[in-house]
Amino acid sequence: MNNLFNNIRIVLVEPSHSGNVGSTARAMLNMGLTNLWLVNPKKGIDDEAIALSCHATEVVKNAKIVANLVEALEGVDYVVGTSARVRRVSLPIEPISKVATNILSKIQKSDEKVAILFGRERTGLLNEELLMSNVHAYIPSNEGYTSLNLAQAVQLVAYEIYKQAVEISDLKQVPEYNHLHKKASVKELQGLYQHFEDSMVQSGFLDKNKPGHVMDKIRRLFQRSELESQEVNILRGFLTSLNNQDKLG
């Protein structure tokens, strides 16, 4: 089980308190998760982070610190964005239980790398950060007080994943994954979206100063499709061919 959990990356975006990083590490290790990434944290790994991690000091010490979210998603195949409130973004909204089921399916059957994003303590994820996700995992709470401590939010998600992993651990072995059908990585998808935007601007279909609404729909379309790497290459090849024809014409 722990080997599978190595495919799950917990990503904290701009955490402001090092104590929350330590508490998050403790919550992770309780549920068998050890892969912690920090995006532009306000403080580094300090004594407070170590102290509040309790016996999860190795999780804190081995945390990877990167400058931006794109770096944190390098090599990732599937991204889950979390929020304590429903956002008006064009992403499917799913309960944590369903998200956990999908995550386990992906790492067991396809050996996919999964990142789960948690936002800033006060404001959460920005909408543009949430839109880098494949799915929006909504953590329901009391409407009168929706504020969840960062470590509590991580604990809730990690618990649901661990619980379901224990429940299915005795099931028959899943079939081997066919690497000819490898899912497109986040980096590949971001490249495809940019290629589409550039092509649509070049053709005059899209206003380069106002790409947002149309591009949100394009992203939503392909995120729902869960494209494979080979399919991304075909689409980009097609776009390149069209662009070359426009230049010749």
Image (spheres, rainbow, N blue to C red):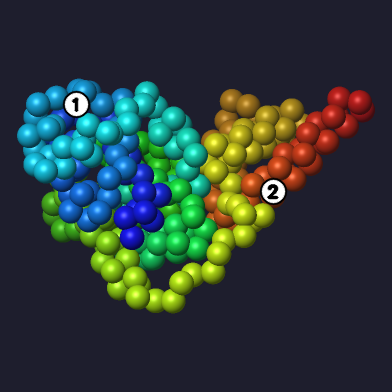
Q: Which mark is residue 215?
A: none
Q: What residue is shown at x 20% (from left), y 49% (from top)?
A: 29
Q: Position of residue 213 (x, y in %)?
A: 55, 40
Q: Secondary structure at mark 1?
A: loop
Q: Quadrant of the C terminus?
A: top right
Of 98 and 87, the residue lying toward us: 98
Of 33 and 93, the residue lying toward us: 33
| Residue 44 location, quadrant | top left
Q: CA distance from mark 2 to mark 1?
A: 40 Å
Dot 2 or dot 1, earlier in sequence: 1
Q: Secondary structure at mark 2?
A: helix
Task: Give the labeled residue for mark 1.
Answer: 45
The answer to whether residue 227 shows anywhere in this view is no
Task: Give the labeled residue for mark 2.
Answer: 230
Q: What residue is shown at x 38% (from left), y 65% (from top)?
A: 101
User: Most extreme residue toward the right, as rendered?
Assistant: 249
Disc 2 crowd, CA 10 A, few/some/many (<14, 14-19, 20+): some
Disc 1 crowd, CA 10 A, few/some/many (<14, 14-19, 20+): some
Vertical comparison of 217 with 68: above or below: below
Q: What residue is shown at x 32% (from left), y 36% (from top)?
A: 37
Q: Position of residue 98 (x, y in %)?
A: 37, 65
Vertical comparison of 77 with 129: above or below: below
* Type of the residue with mark 1: Ile
Of 28 and 173, the residue lying toward us: 173
Vertical comparison of 72 with 163: above or below: above
Q: Position of residue 108 (x, y in %)?
A: 45, 62
Horizontally, residue 18 falls left or right of residue 112, namely: left
Q: Position of residue 41 (x, y in %)?
A: 26, 26
* Type of the residue with mark 2: Gln
